[in-house]
Every structure is written in structure tokens, then in C-alpha cells.
């Protein structure tokens, strides 16, 4: 899904601009169709809508980890990213905001989800606005967001927004799930929080391996 | 352009026979491989340096010093010399000794090493890898270029009035390469000194190698050593060759599938597509390796890894014969045809470096011997002298 580029009007060097932002969505769902992907798309839509309400256009790039599974394992063995994985890692690293959604497997994020996080450069997510989501069979797994996912992204120094969204199977039914705080409301709130954080920042600049190499004099002096 | 081989000296079980050589056999095989490469006409033999099993080459200058006496033409080098965990004073001494013994038929490549525990085993911290490489090499250069060195730094005990011996051959230190796969700081270091930069690309896509080499070239020019395309570049590579492509694939596949590092990971089809590993006929190797200059520019040294993953000695010697007989002559001719006149064909030889140093007036004809103030004296005597 791609939102067309709007006109950009920088507000000057002191404040954030309405320049286009890039949201990267990582979905670790394995089945097709996948409720994890469904939740990921809804979270992306909510974030894009909330950004638009703030005059900021956003481009969304979605990464299905299922398509990269072999490359992820290969990278853990060889140390280098091949094919589409290299592109996916570049997108994640250059994102203005990240939406990360995993199914719950054995009381935690899926192994594939963690393996993908393992091959992301350890500094790539530092300071990045991140929205967390998870899916599972019942609401009894919902704290996985707080005891598994949030610590992982805290370790990576990501800026995780306060609201994470857990969707149980019941949440997708019409009258099912949570009557007081139904899923669409939680999605809107999470999207608003991510949008606020992203809109508050200057757009990410592409960072190359060679951008921050100190001069040799600095290396010698250091 | 130089073509040679490098060995990491791994002791690996041959997956087709289940046979594992012992350390002694592996060391002797490395010597045989190096001699064979010399006799076959390859330009370079380089040994790795490791301090943990299953690797045997812990003492490169012992091995290369012996080979200097046995071989005639081949340049003896390293891949790599650990600039982080070795004492730079010992490196200055050992490689100057090798330079003298080999009559200048050597150079060496600095690297940080990729085995975490080696740092604590040698009293260092891996998080200081780059600062160690920077400081130790700066000291090493001074020990080679200045007769008497007073020095203090962060990582080593200070030196007062220290002279590293033997002094470099003809007063000119060995040529140095710096190897790094993903640290631009090391490419910057190579560029700063006008040293060579070798990218051992065997596990990496060529686009990554090209970006790193290009960065080194730009910085080489920035630091005033010449044009970017005149910087001294080497690449690592990996091949397995037989007369027919199918024979090469069939024979190499079990070694690939069980190899340390990449075995049980990507398929040989994927890996040969993504990295410089080329398995096939001599013509396929020629086509692949002749194309790398299009990505990294005209370069001066291509090294091949051919003796790993449990390949038997006989097979390795056959690989050398095919490389030297059918592949290298063609690659060398194509490189020479493509190379612009202002780009060096080879890394500088010792004779060329001596001539350049004399022309620049940076070296005298004769080294003046120092006076021995130390032998037979004690610290107390020295206190008396300075009192």
C-alpha cells in the first residue's frame, strides 16, 4: 500500500516538517491470509490517517517475514544479507517509524520474528518510533506485548509508544472481544500515538555506512 | 597484476572420507601448498594467523621464514596479521626479520581478527578493536621508520630509547595492506598512510566490496597519495575448478555443504550467485574474476582460498596447477590490456619502494649502527649514569 506523495512544506530548521515520512511494517504472520498481517495493515492505516490529520503524508512499506525466512536463517549463518533481505534491512534502518507485529508462539514472539530482529543492525532501531502489535488465539496472551516485545525493543533503544495492540481471535468478531475498549478503538489510539511521535521528529535521513567515519586525525587522537 | 592463494589453515574433516588430518600434517600441507604455488608460478602465498583450533597457523613468520628459504619467486604475505592482539613491538621485529631473510620478497596484511576470545586471551578488549588497530599500527610504523623511539600510548607499556632490530631492509619497511570487511575506519587508515587495502570478499556480495573499495580509493586520493584509481587494492576470492562445470559442482558440493562458516546454510547455487565463490570450468572462473575490475576498478592483487573445508592435499595441488596453468595467465593478460598506463600493475616491490624512498630523500644509503648502552648493565647502573 502506498500513499501518494503530497506537497511538502518545511517549517524551518527549528520545528518538524510536513515532509513525507516512511513507515515500515514488519509482519511475522505465517498463514495466508494472516490475522497478524491484518492487524499490521490496520495499524498502518490508523497511523497514516492520524499523520494525514497532522498534514503529514506517509509512505508505507510492508515486509512479510515469511517471504524472507530462508534469507534470515542464511544471514544468521553467513553474516551477510542476501537478495530481498538486504533491501528489507535497508528499509527498516531508514524508516521514520516501525510497526512490528508478531503472532504469539509458545508464550512469546515467534522465532522468525526474533531471528529477523537479530539480523537488524544493533544500532538501527535506536531512537526509532515503534508501535508493537501481537496476535493470538485468546486474550490470555495479551501481556506478551509487555513482557516479551517491549523489553526486546527497549534493549534496542527504540522509542516504543505507550499503547501496544493485542488482537485475539475474538477481537475480529462483530460483537466479540472487548466491549469497553474494542479493537478498532485500540488501533486508533495506537496509531495516534505513533503518528504523534513520528510527526514530532525530523524525517529520517538515509544513513550510509560511510557517512559517519571519523577523520584519521580523530581516530589517532581518540 | 598479482594472483595468489591464501590459507586460513583450518583442520577440517574431509566430508567424503571422514578423515581428519592432525595439526602436524596440516602445517606440513600448508608448506607443500606454498612451495607448489611457487613452482607453478603463482605470485603470492599468504597465511592467516589464528590462536584457536581448528586452525594451525599461529606463528606466521616462522612459517614464512622457512618458506623464504625454500621458494624462489613467490611473495610471502599474511592474511591476516593481528594488529590488535599482537604486541606491535614484536610485529616490528618479526616482520623486519622476515623482510631481511626473504630479501624483501614479502609484505603483510593487518587485520583485527574475528575470534572474540582471542582478545581476552591476549589481554585486550574486543570493544577496543579499532583503537587498538590504530594505535598499534602507528607505533609499528614508527619502530620501522625511526631508529630510536620514545613512545607512550593507551594500550602498551611505554618505550624509552627503544630500537627495533633488525632495522628494515635497505632502510625501507615492508609494504603493508590493511584488511577489513565492514569497517570503513580501517579503509580510512589504509588510505591515510597510502598503504594497500585488501577486501576479503569471500562471504560478501560484490556490491558491498565495491562500496568499501571505492571509499578507500576516494580517501587515498584525499590524503594525497595519488589518484583514486592508483590506490593499491586487493581482493579475496574462492574457486573450485575442474575441466567441466558439472565435474566441479559434483566434486565440491559435499565440501561446500559441510564447510565451516557457510555449510548447512545457503545453497551452493545461492552462494555462488551472491559471493565471489565460483565453482566451474576454468573459463567460468576467468569470466567471473575478469569482471570484478568493472566493480572495484583495476586492482593489483587477487588471492584465492583453495585449501579449506577438508579438501585433500592432492586436490589442492591440482587446483593450483589449474589456476596457474589455465586461469591466471588469461586473467593477467586481460587485466594488463584493460589497465590504464598511470595505474600500477602490481603492489610495489621492495626494490621499487627503495628506489622511491631514495628519490624522495627519505632514506639514507647506510644505516648507522647504534651504540650498545644496555648489554650487561643493570637498572642500578643506569641510575648511576643519569645521576
Image (spheres, rainbow, N blue to C red):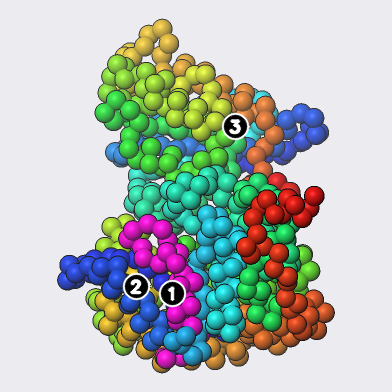
Can residue B217 be seen in the rendering of this structure? no
Q: Is residue B367 above or below residue A159?
A: below
Q: Position of residue B291 (x, y in %)?
A: 52, 78
Residue B27: give its label. 2
Task: Say above or below: B236 vs B286.
Answer: above
Q: Residues within 10 Å of mark 1 (few under 14, many from 20)?
A: some
Left or right position of B56 against B382: left
Q: Position of residue B220 (x, y in %)?
A: 71, 67
> For residue B57: magenta?
yes
Left/right placement of residue B85 relative to residue A133 reads right
Q: Residue B35: tell me if it is visible.
A: yes
Toward the viewer: B46 or B227? B46
In the image, residue B32 sits, relative to residue B52, either above or below, namely below
Q: Tell me what residue is drawn at x 41 percent, y 31 percent.
A: A101
Residue A69, given in percent of the width and then of the height, sits at 35, 47
Please tell me if label 2 and label 1 are on a single chain: yes
Q: Which residue is mark 3?
A: A127
| Residue B63: assigned label | 1
Between discs 2 and 1, the one toward the N terminus = 2
Q: Chain of mark 1?
A: B
Q: Which residues are magenta?
A: B39-68
Residue at 65% across, 80% down: B169
Q: Crowdedness of circle 3 by 10 Å Cα count: few (<14), some, many (20+)?
A: some
Give the residue displayed 72% in from the left and 39% down from the top: A7
The secondary element bearing badge 3 is classed as loop
Calculate the distance from the C-alpha at mark 1 to the C-alpha at mark 3.
50 Å
For the residue labelled by badge 2, is the local secondary structure a helix, a strand or a loop? helix
Residue at 51%, 89% in the rendered image: B73
The answer to whether dots 3 and 2 both sit on one chain is no
Residue B218 located within the stretch drawn in magenta: no
**Mark carried by residue A156:** none
Amino acid at each position: 500500500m502506498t500513499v501518494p506523495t503530497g506537497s511538502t512544506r518545511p517549517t524551518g530548521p527549528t520545528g518538524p516538517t510536513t515532509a513525507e515520512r516512511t513507515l515500515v511494517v514488519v509482519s511475522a504472520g505465517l498463514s495466508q491470509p494472516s490475522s497478524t498481517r491484518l492487524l499490521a495493515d490496520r495499524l498502518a492505516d490508523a497511523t497514516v490517517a492520524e499523520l494525514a490529520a497532522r498534514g503529514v503524508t506517509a509512505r508505507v512499506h510492508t515486509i512479510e517475514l515469511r517471504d524472507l525466512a530462508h534469507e534470515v536463517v542464511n544471514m544468521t549463518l553467513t553474516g551477510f544479507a542476501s537478495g530481498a533481505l538486504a533491501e528489507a534491512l535497508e528499509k527498516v534502518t531508514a524508516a521514520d517509524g516501525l510497526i512490528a507485529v508478531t503472532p504469539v508462539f509458545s508464550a512469546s514472539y515467534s522465532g522468525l520474528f526474533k531471528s529477523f530482529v537479530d539480523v537488524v543492525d544493533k544500532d538501527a532501531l535506536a531512537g526509532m518510533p515503534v508501535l508493537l502489535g501481537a496476535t493470538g488465539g485468546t486474550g490470555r496472551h495479551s501481556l506478551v506485548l509487555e513482557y516479551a516485545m517491549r523489553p526486546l525493543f527497549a534493549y534496542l533503544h527504540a522509542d516504543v509508544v505507550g499503547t501496544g495492540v493485542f488482537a485475539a481471535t475474538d477481537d475480529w468478531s462483530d460483537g466479540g472481544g472487548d466491549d469497553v475498549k474494542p479493537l478498532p478503538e485500540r488501533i486508533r489510539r495506537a496509531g495516534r500515538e505513533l503518528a504523534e511521535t513520528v510527526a514530532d521528529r525530523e524525517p529520517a535521513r538515509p544513513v550510509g555506512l560511510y557517512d559517519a567515519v571519523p577523520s584519521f586525525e580523530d581516530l589517532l587522537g581518540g | 597484476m598479482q594472483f595468489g592463494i591464501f590459507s586460513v589453515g583450518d583442520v577440517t574433516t574431509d566430508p567424503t572420507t571422514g578423515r581428519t588430518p592432525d595439526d602436524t600434517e596440516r602445517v606440513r600441507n600448508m608448506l607443500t601448498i606454498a612451495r607448489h604455488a611457487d613452482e607453478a608460478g603463482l605470485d603470492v602465498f599468504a597465511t592467516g594467523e589464528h590462536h584457536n583450533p581448528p586452525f594451525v597457523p599461529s606463528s606466521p613468520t616462522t612459517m614464512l621464514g622457512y618458506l623464504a628459504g625454500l621458494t624462489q619467486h613467490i611473495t610471502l604475505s599474511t592474511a591476516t596479521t593481528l594488529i590488535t592482539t599482537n604486541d606491535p613491538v614484536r610485529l616490528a621485529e618479526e616482520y623486519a626479520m622476515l623482510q631481511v631473510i626473504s630479501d624483501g620478497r614479502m609484505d603483510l596484511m593487518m587485520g583485527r581478527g574475528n575470534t572474540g576470545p582471542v582478545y581476552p586471551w591476549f589481554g585486550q578488549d574486543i570493544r577496543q578493536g579499532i583503537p587498538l588497530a590504530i594505535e598499534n599500527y602507528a607505533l609499528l610504523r614508527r619502530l620501522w621508520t625511526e631508529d630510536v623511539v620514545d613512545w607512550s600510548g593507551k594500550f602498551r607499556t611505554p618505550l624509552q630509547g627503544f630500537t627495533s632490530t633488525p632495522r628494515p631492509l635497505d632502510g625501507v619497511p615492508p609494504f603493508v595492506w590493511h584488511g577489513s570487511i565492514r569497517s570503513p575506519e580501517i579503509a580510512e587508515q589504509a588510505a591515510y598512510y597510502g598503504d594497500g587495502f585488501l577486501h576479503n570478499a569471500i562471504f560478501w556480495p560484490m556490491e558491498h566490496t565495491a562500496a568499501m573499495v571505492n571509499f578507500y580509493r576516494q580517501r587515498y586520493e584525499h590524503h594525497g597519495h595519488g589518484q583514486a584509481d592508483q590506490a593499491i587494492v586487493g581482493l579475496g576470492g574462492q574457486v573450485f575448478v575442474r575441466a567441466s562445470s558439472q565435474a566441479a559442482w559434483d566434486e565440491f558440493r559435499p565440501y561446500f555443504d559441510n564447510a565451516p562458516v557457510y555449510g548447512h546454510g545457503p545453497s551452493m547455487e545461492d552462494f555462488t550467485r551472491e559471493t565471489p565463490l565460483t565453482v566451474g570450468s576454468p573459463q567460468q572462473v576467468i569470466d567471473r574474476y575478469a569482471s570484478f575490475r568493472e566493480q572495484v576498478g583495476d586492482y593489483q592483487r587477487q588471492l584465492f582460498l583453495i585449501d579449506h573445508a577438508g579438501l585433500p592435499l592432492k586436490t589442492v595441488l591440482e587446483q593450483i596447477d589449474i589456476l596457474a596453468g589455465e586461469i591466471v595467465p588469461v586473467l593477467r593478460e586481460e587485466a594488463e590490456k584493460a589497465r590504464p598506463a598511470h595505474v600500477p600493475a602490481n603492489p610495489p616491490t621492495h626494490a621499487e619502494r627503495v628506489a622511491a624512498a631514495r628519490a624522495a630523500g627519505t632514506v639514507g644509503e647506510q644505516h648507522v649502527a647504534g651504540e650498545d648502552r644496555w648489554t650487561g648493565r643493570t637498572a642500578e647502573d643506569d641510575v648511576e649514569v643519569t645521576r
